[in-house]
Structure formats: structure tokens, C-alpha cells
Image: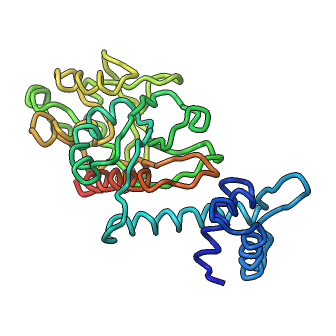
Amino acid sequence: MDRLDAIKIFVRVGESGSVSAVARELGVGQPAVSKQVASLEAHLGAQLLMRTSRNLSLTEAGRDFYESGARLIGDLEATESRVGRGQASPSGVVRVTVAHAFSRLYVVPRLPKFFARYPDVGVEMLDSDRTSNLVEEGIDLAIRNGALTDSSLVAKKIGSSPAVLVASTEYLSRRGEPTKPSDCDSHDAVLFVAQEGVRPWRLGGGRLGPVSYQPRGSFRTNDAEQMREAVLAGLGITQAPLWLFSRDLAAGSVKRILMDYEPAPVPISAVRPPGRRMAVKVLVFIEFLAELLAELSEK
């Protein structure tokens, strides 16, 4: 048994839900496909497929092995596409949902680099400030910030973003720069408001370890870009993901403060529907995003 060929065949059976369909696709008889799957089951010592007279489904072990096998084949195809002479370049359109501010301020300005590398891949970027149903809406990928709650999706952490305290240099020159969290009591804050109310700042470091600090200020919003504009206008200090202010920090119009009290970085994950083989076009886009996020972790 060629184990790689057997895994490829099993993954295709898992995707299509039909042994006969895979046999037609490969131009072989149905017994040949069944034999490959049976050989793989014998090698693993586990039943991968549940067969009845009317349908075919993955067992619990089969679902686990399918996910691993699909990633393996996807990674192999991506590697062949990148380095193999004569291999077809990734192509097609990647439909991806990304939070509006993250896409507009951080991802979209860096897309020319991606298109130069993969000229045959298009990107359709959809607003994901609401939670999308990836399967029903035909979405290949969602980029999610923070902890994930939907365990039915296939998620992979691709990076993280530091949560930073920032203020405009103009504000700090006028009001002074805090050197410890308690100094913020005498400062104005730009507040992010969620459904549960004003979101406190998460602070780390110090003898007390992680703590929650409730800032005070005259301006509050539930929109990240409005929060950024308020900071640039000198309305006060805020806590936000680093990517929101990356250009402003580089330009020197905003300063990162209280760095010794920053909390753990916020994870960023690539999420995709279960039971679907990851296309090479999706894989290379995920790799590109991971490169971008690696730049944040270095700052």
C-alpha cells in the first residue's frame, strides 16, 4: 500500500461521501478504492468509514483522521505549488471575512505584496463585524480576533496582536505621560463600549499580576476606527490592538505607553468550515496573513 495515495483517496471519499464517485474520478473500479481505504484502516487499526446499504459516513476516528489527512495533503500541494517547477500556481478567488477595521487599516494596504506573489489568486473580502455562517454563505475563511467559542469550526492560530496603551504625542505633551497604572486616574480615556458596557483595560505585570482597570473619559464608541480618530484628535489614552495604530506609531503621531503593564497578546485565528478540504489558494492566503502578524509580534 502506498500510504500517501491511500490517504489522498480516503480524504476524497470523506469530502464526497461516496466511494463510487471517487472511483469515477480516478478512473478505477469501486473495489480498488474500497481496498485502499480498507488497507489504511488495517494499517491504523481503526475503522474510518461507517458503511450501510444506503449511505457512508465517517466514524469518530475517521473524522479525526480526515482533518489531519486533509491538512497534510493541502500542505503538500501548497509546497509543490511554491517550489516545484512546472507545478500550477494557486488560482481562484478566496472569500474571506475579516473585521472591518483590521482589514481596512492593516490587511488591505499590504495586499499588493500578496498579489505580486500569487497573481492568479483573487481575494473577496467581506465585513465580519457580525458572525457569518461560513457554510451557508460559501465563505472559505474567517479571521477572528480573541478567544473562539464555536467548536464546530476548524481553527488555527496564525498569530497574535499585542494589546497596547497609546495616546497621541500632542495629548502627552499637554497632559504628561503616565508611568504607572494609577497615574491614569488623572487622565482622560477613549472608551470602547460593548453590549455589557464600557470595556475595562486589561493590565499585566507588577506585583499583583493581571488586573482589570476601569478607565474614565468623555468619549465612548463601539467602533475601532472612531476610537483611533479620537486618540489622534487628542481626546485621551486608549487600549487597543497594536495593528490599529501601527501606521501612527511608525509616523510618530502616537506613542505606546506603560509597556511594562501590557497584558498577554490577543490571539488571531484562521477559521474555516469543517469537512472541507483546504484549497491551496486558501492555504497560501493564510500563510500570507501569518507573515503579516509575525511583523506585529516583533514590535
Q: Which of 191 and 188 is in front in this view?
A: 191
Extreme-right residue of the structure:
53
The spot of residue 297 in percent (x, y) is: 29, 55
Along the viewing direction, whichever of 212 and 134 lies nearer the viewer: 134
> What's the residue at 38%, 34% (across, down)?
125
User: 231 left or right of 219?
Assistant: left
Q: Which residue lies most toward the top here?
A: 218
Looking at the picture, how far across and down is residue 145, in whole percent?
44, 42
- Left or right? Give the position of 225 relative to 176: right
Residue at 47% across, 43% down: 146
* Residue 222, x across and y down, in percent: 40, 22
Q: In this orientation, does residue 208 appear?
A: no
Percent x, y of residue 238: 29, 31
- Badge count: 0
- Residue 260 position (above or below residue 41): above
The answer to whether residue 227 is visible is: yes
Which residue is at a point 68% across and 53% down the rendered structure image? 16
- In this rendered view, identify the residue nearer to me: 198 or 136: 136
